[in-house]
Image: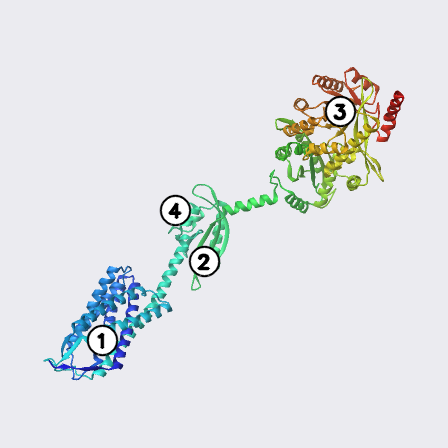
Amino acid sequence: MNHIHGSYNISIVILSYLVAVVASYAALDLAGRVSAARNGKNRAMWLFGGAIFMGFGIWGMHFVGMLAYKLSIPVSYDFAWVVLSIVVAVLASLIALHVVGRDDLGIRRLLLGGTLMAIGITAMHYTGMTAMRVGITYDPILFSLSVAIALAASVAALWLSHYFRRDHSWKGVMYKLGSGLVMGAAIAGMHYTGMAAARFHKGNQTELLPGMKMNQEVLAYVVALGTVILLSFVLFVIFFDKRLSSKDQEIVERGKWYKSLYENHLDGIITIDIDNQIVDMNPAVSLILGIRSMDYINQPASALLELHVEQYREQAKQTFVASLRKGQPQTTESVVIHREGHLVHLSTLSVPVNIEEDVKGTYLIIRDITEEKRAKETIQQMAYHDELTGLPNRRLLMRTLEEAIRNEEAGSSGFGVLVMDIDRFKMINDSLGHAVGDQFLRMVTERITQAAAGMNVMTARMGGDEFTLICHGDPIRDTSVILAQRLIDYIQIPYRLKDNDFYVTASIGIAIYPHHAENAEYLLKNADTAMYEVKRNGKNGFQFYSSQFDEHVMEKIELEGALRKAVERNELLVHYQPQISIQNEQVIGVEALLRWIHPEKGLIPPGTFIPIAEETGMIGEIGAWVLREACRQMQQWQSRYGWNVPVSVNLSTQQFHQENLVGSIKGILEETGLKPEYLEIEITESMMMDAIRSSQILRELTELGIRISMDDFGTGYSSLSYLKMFPIQKLKIDRSFIKDITRNEDDRAIVATIIAMAHNLKMDVIAEGVETKEQLDFLMNNGCDDIQGYYFSKPLSSSDVESKYLTIMDELSKEASS
């Protein structure tokens, strides 16, 4: 057999490799287009068209590679076999694109597709070799290697094509280019391995076919150029299609975004066309309005107005019309009736749909603001109303006052401002606790509402137990008097608190606009001044403002300032009023009474400065000072004169309810050295309102050895229950019953009953305020134990006590001992 030898044209070999790289890159891009084509028609077009172009590309590389090998004799090609090799290349490409175009590429599909593609490429190569009009035999080993390379290259190509098919970023381009270089090398490796397996020799088919005779090198360049041009065209088409597809995809994606926004938006969106027909509505509309969208789509927009509360329909209609007419967004708030019957507050935004500067319709965007409305109302309520009673607070009162002043017509009778304070509220609040105090204030609010029923009155709570009322009427002075009297009558009705009845009164000051002041601040100030004047004169009443009251207020302010310095300046002192036994007229004790010697005003009565001390909170400090001074003085008298009688000290309500009262008293006794049995604590019924707390305190004091006396007995309420519950050793009959005991049958009956009851309960009785022999005789005849009052002695300074009682006792003691 005559072998024919040949040689390779290196430039054409390189050219064939470049063709293989371009074909591989085109194949990777074609795979992406086939995969991206979701439409069946587009997918088929890209699949078959891509297979033809890709097949020509692979065949072109193969044919150029064959032409790169130049034999020593001229070689012609059988046209039929050439065409057949092209068809085989196209079929191999079709298999490849079909495989990688699937969404799922498992290992079995990859191997099957790679095997079929390898068969196709191998068949294409050796069919093309058969087209050569020359004898060819093959080395079995190299032949098998070429097939193996084809299989490996096909599997790798399919995997890379599937992996990079949808990556359109610049990184994806670089990856595809790198993959094209690898795939091109693999395809070229298969081809040149197959060429190496071929053994050419002279045969009977060496005659050139007609029309196929052509310079081999020129033919190689022509085929390579044509293939590159063809593949470039394919890449251009792919690029152009990508751009169009990208735009289409972007439009589709954007449409999906807008559709998702439309359908999933929490606000309701209603689409209305230019003919006022409802085109669409999102699901939120049904949730907000409680309607079914199918009942309203393709219906006139006016159907929506029927959902609105009647007074809001016209406003909603005008907003919609204005949006279409002006071509600008319009907003409004309205109220609709939900299908379930409750009201829904809506905020509606009407947004025109403008297309090429023409209004084609509108979007109604509705939002449920019911909760926002409630929250605003709650905030408004909190800002302008008292949390406890629900009444307007000071802020709203001032606004209302200023508005009333602005609206007041010239020559009218004006309006009245009533400032009301609840007498004895502090006693209830301190004794029963703040929770009961709050309950009491709510009850007072109900009473005020009842008293003002049918009148043009606005009531506000200023804080604590102070209320202010703005009253309108004609004539305003008479109307204010009627209101004030009704308030007093309603307030003094008993209150049931903790299973007991409690009685309070009201002090009311009145200022009339414009007679007493012409602005809100001074109206309140003057009404407040009038109210304090009522308190100064005994409480439980009302009083119109007078300029003379300002002098009393200034005096009170001055006294308050001076009282704060009184303890530091030693202006306070304690006087002692002897308590006398009726049986032997001997002193059996003394009561400590506070006095204030002002450096300029002289002696100031306790009734003047004690209320100031209670209002300002100074009573605690002052009361502790009195207790310490009384114990010190009694201990001194006992040490010097051997005068072993108890000293009585009054506790204020604030003192009684202070923290660690028992510990504080015990500390004072230890500090002064006075034994507990020589201290008598006087309490009032008002301190006993919180029975549990009060009984605990009294029990602890009694256990120390301190005696407990009930002061002002008979002036409070529920006295019998207190006597039954608490460890009380002595009752003190209030001076108000003693004053008219010789003339008033009721007072005589009350005093006689108190004495008899106390003795039956094993208690001592002492009467205060005894000033005449007739009073003394009555008390003596009814079995009263002790008395104190001016009939025997007025309150004395410590030195006067010593000179009147103790010096004589000391002298008698010395005479007896001598």
Asked if the residue at tag 4 contacts the one at tag 3, i.e. Cβ–Cβ closer than 8 Å, the answer is no
The mark closer to the camera, 3 or 4, is 3
Any part of residue 797 in sight: no
Earlier residue among tags 2 and 3: 2
Residue named by callout 1: 192
Quadrant in which the C terminus is drawn? top right
- Foreground mark, 1 or 3? 1
Measured Cα–Cα span from mark 4 to mark 2: 24 Å
Q: Residue at 82% of width from left, 29% of height from top? A: 639
Q: CA distance from mark 1 to mark 2?
A: 70 Å
Does the CB distance between marks 1 and 4 fall below 8 Å?
A: no
Which amino acid, by three-letter code, is at mark 1?
Tyr
Sequence-wise, the earlier of marks 1 and 4 is 1
User: In the drawing, what numbered circle is on residue 357?
Assistant: none
Q: Amino acid at mark 4?
A: Arg
Q: Nearer the viewer, residue 266 or 641?
A: 641
| Rendering coords of residue 732 (x, y %) | 75, 23
Residue designated by label 2: 352
Q: Which mark is residue 292?
A: 4
Q: Residues within 10 Å of mark 3 (few under 14, many from 20)?
A: some
| Lower sequence index among marks 1 and 3 | 1
**Where is residue 471, by image quadrant?**
top right
What residue does disc 3 label?
734
Q: Residue furthest front?
A: 818
* Label 2 residue SS: strand
Q: Amino acid at mark 3?
A: Asp
Quadrant of the drawing holding the N terminus: bottom left
Q: Quadrant of residue 786?
A: top right
Answer left or right for 664 relative to 293. Answer: right
The quarter of the picture where residue 92 lies is bottom left
* Colour pattern: rainbow
Residue 694: horizontal and vertical position, in percent? 66, 29
